[in-house]
Amino acid sequence: MDQKKVYGRWNFWEELAGYPMMIYYWIKGERIKKMLSKRIEKARFRANQIILTEKIKQEFIIDYKKTDNFFSYHFKNIDDSRNHNFEEKITYCLQQYRKESSRLISSSNLMKLQENFLSGAEATLFLYFALNHKVKREIRLSDIMIGENSSRIFTNFLKEKKFIDENHNLLVDQKSSLIRIHRFLKDNLIINPEFQDITIIEAMENEYNTNFDKGTFSRAVIVKPTDFEEGIYKELSKLLNIKS
């Protein structure tokens, strides 16, 4: 990351102006995490209003690749990893911000870093939210499950069991159980057995808006199902006409 793009030139008058701003934020008690959360929600709201035509999509892809600020530098690096969910990526960016700010002794540079970080986060995440799940990752459960209504029946079942909410977001920290349930469906030909685990992981990530790393997936499928999971299998067998 080019430091000049973050801090620019040093001016004495900015240093004088920086201290009152630092005191203002300290008195107000509005810490960087809280301020970032507001920017994230603002970016998410704006992105949800976008109708992503092919023309806009291509323009946004170019803009996202070209974003160059303190936040985007770290966010795009961690975004390449499939082993971190969105919250973990944000935590990582906050950690990088705190490392950088702890090295600063200039009040003006601290204020510049803060503004670059927050405005950069809003600009970067607006494009990220607009494009995510619409461009980057398209495969869903319906693409890998056999039967016209299988995915709908299955996701409705997961909603009833409070595994996911109405928007398919994962509600509980039961990734291993969910992985074994999907392996059960694959073993019984509801999920097409021709698909490799990596494809199933990708479809699950898109469907449930979370991350399933390969290590967790591999470990989960070799563990014996719990009594609760065996009960789930029996209910799914009836719903999806799985023959014993």
Image (cartoon, grey):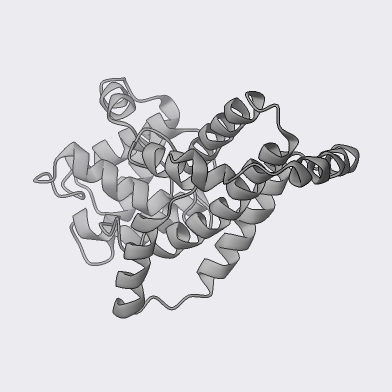
Residue 237 x, y percent position in the rendering: 29, 46
Depth check: give the residue in front, 44 or 63. 63
Residue appearing at x 44%, y 50% in the figure: 158
Give the answer, above or below, for where 45 lies relative to 111.
below
Q: How many marks?
A: 0
* Quadrant of res 39: bottom right
Residue appearing at x 50%, y 47% in the figure: 5
Depth check: give the residue in front, 77 or 187. 77
Quadrant in the picture for the C terminus = top left
Residue 1 x, y percent position in the rendering: 43, 39
Residue 13 x, y percent position in the rendering: 78, 46
Give the answer, above or below, for where 154 lies relative to 134.
above
Q: Is residue 215 visible?
A: yes
**Outermost residue, front direction?**
12
**Outermost residue, left direction?**
194
- Locate residue 71 relative to residue 131 in the image: left or right: right
Residue 140 x, y percent position in the rendering: 29, 57
* Quadrant of res 94: top right
Residue appearing at x 45%, y 31% in the figure: 228
Q: Is residue 170 visible?
A: no
Depth check: give the residue in front, 16 or 45. 16
- Locate residue 159 relative to residue 23 in the image: left or right: left
Give the answer, above or below, for where 187 lies relative to 158.
above
* Quadrant of res 196: top left
